[in-house]
Amino acid sequence: MTLHALFLGAGPAGIGPLVNAQQRGLLPRLLDTGVAVVDRGDRMGPGTIGQHLINSDTAGGTFLECLDDDLFAPVAGSGPRRRLERYRQSAAPLPLVGEFLGEIGAALRGALDAHPVSRFLPGTRAVSIRRSTDGGFATTLAAGEETFELRSRYVISALGGYQDHQRALAAPIVPGVRLADGYADRVLHTEQVLTAGGAERVAEMLAAAGTRRVVIIGGSHSAFSAAWVLLNRVRGEFGPGDITVLHRKPPRIFYPTAADAHAEGYTDFGADDLCPLTQRVYRLAGLRWDSRDLLRRIWSGAEDRVGLVRLDPAVDDGVTTLLKEAAVIIPAFGYRPVTIPVLDEHGRPMPLYGSGPGTPPLVDTRCRVLDAGGDPVPGLFGIGLASGFTLDGPLGGEPSFTGQTNGLWLYQNGIGERILGQLL
Ligand SMILES: Cc1cc2nc3c(=O)[nH]c(=O)nc-3n(C[C@H](O)[C@H](O)[C@H](O)COP(=O)(O)OP(=O)(O)OC[C@H]3O[C@@H](n4cnc5c(N)ncnc54)[C@H](O)[C@@H]3O)c2cc1C
């Protein structure tokens, strides 16, 4: 039997289009077409978000929006939902967000498992995707010792992201300086710092080096989250200037409106930094919640343990000295999408645009995976962390924003809807 749609990965992004379908009353119609969702883990929903021991950068209320729906009625009374409710207007602990998504995933799994032609396959690893001559796909999957193929009209790849160690080591920091050149044993990626055991590992490295100097490279949410972990979770006290954040672009903070920003004396924005849809200031680029608070305290001088240094890739300006003195170096260079080999009708590997040099996107604005030439592979979609999706017109976002967009709300709304529209 040929399925209509095969979802690879059942994390927050993989379930996004299904949540969107449910909210718009389209889930029964989608499931009637024949859908399978696979994950190498045993649950639908949580993915890896709950492994981060920090608070969310979105208000708890955004995770709860999807509950206005019958299918999720059991979730409404669940423990994780009740605990998440306390964070409706604030940042929520990500482990709790993960638990809550597990409840949402369980409700969706119930719908899939009860359906005659749709299902969830836990403990199933996606191995490769081959285009078939009928225009669909044959995807190779592995469950335990068994390997098998599922045929489908569409494939949605939602396998999450990873931090590329080799790329981070090879990236030029300032002229003639790469982390590969003598710094590799001091490198911890943000993913390592933000997850279980990260704070303890940092403490051990600081103790072994006999200094508490840390350098974080990057100005993103992950960079400031790492600084937050250092200050709040790592044993021992940091002194003034012990932590340096090296950033290329000036870090920005989010405000609900320009008036709110002006009221607090924040004027570092122009018309291009306002979302035309919501009028929010730095809706996409701006730091929020804990990272935002930290940055504001650094700016005001209330937090002197963290220093900000503008990194000019053309000038060393003391950067080498900072790196040499650091016990721990944390590159916050973002994530790359996890992909599996895509093969053409003859079984030959098809290189993807997203695997090229630099950080090209995996998908276009319709979430279609791009081949090496930048053309969409018909029927193959990508969604989720590091897929490279950029917001466009109807979804808003400040025109000045150049990065990619990740977020549960978007997976369940604008981005999920975009994929669903093409599946149905
Ligand atoms: C530190 C951090 C904090 C974030 N905070 C927020 C936040 O506060 N709010 C927000 O909206 N977003 C946040 N995000 C962004 C994003 O929503 C999360 O990263 C989210 O977990 C991304 O979901 P995903 O499904 O793309 O990836 P994942 O959560 O990693 O899920 C991928 C899934 O694919 C499965 N998988 C992987 N490989 C295979 C394979 N070969 N075969 C089968 N299954 C496979 C995995 O088991 C997993 O279930 C954050 C991201 C990071 C990195």
Image (tube, helix red, strand yellow):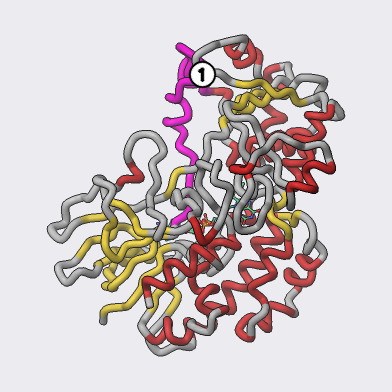
Q: In the displayed structure, would residue 91 be above or below residue 164?
A: below
Relative horizontal placement of residue 371, taking residue 176 as reference (left or right) = left
Quadrant of the rendering where the N terminus is positioned: bottom left
Residue at the spot x=50%, y=74% of the render?
18
Q: Position of residue 201 (x, y in %)?
A: 66, 33
Residue 363 lies in the magenta stretch: no
**Count of picture labels:** 1
Q: In the displayed structure, would residue 107 be above or below residue 405?
A: below
Residue at the spot x=28%, y=63% of the render?
140
**Ligand 1 sits in which quadrant?**
bottom right
Asked whether residue 21 is in view, the answer is yes
Kindly indicate the quadrant of the structure image that contains residue 170. top left
Relative horizontal placement of residue 103, taking residue 171 as reference (left or right) = right
* Amino acid, disc 1: Pro
Q: In the displayed structure, would residue 22 be above or below residue 88?
A: below
Relative horizontal placement of residue 19, taking residue 93 as reference (left or right) = left
Residue at the spot x=57%, y=26% of the render?
248
Residue farthest along the front direction in this orientation = 271
Q: In the displayed structure, would residue 24 be above or below residue 340?
A: below
Residue 170 lies in the magenta stretch: yes
Residue at the spot x=67%, y=65% of the render?
63
Asked whether residue 234 is in view, the answer is no
For disc 1, the marked residue is: 313
Relative horizontal placement of residue 170, taking residue 320 as reference (left or right) = left
Q: Position of residue 298 (x, y in %)?
A: 79, 29
Q: What segment carries the magenta color?
A: 159-184
Q: Position of residue 320 (x, y in %)?
A: 58, 11
Q: Position of residue 283 (x, y in %)?
A: 64, 49
Label 1 element class: loop
Quadrant of the rendering where the C terminus is positioned: bottom left
Q: Residues within 10 Å of mark 1 (few under 14, many from 20)?
A: few
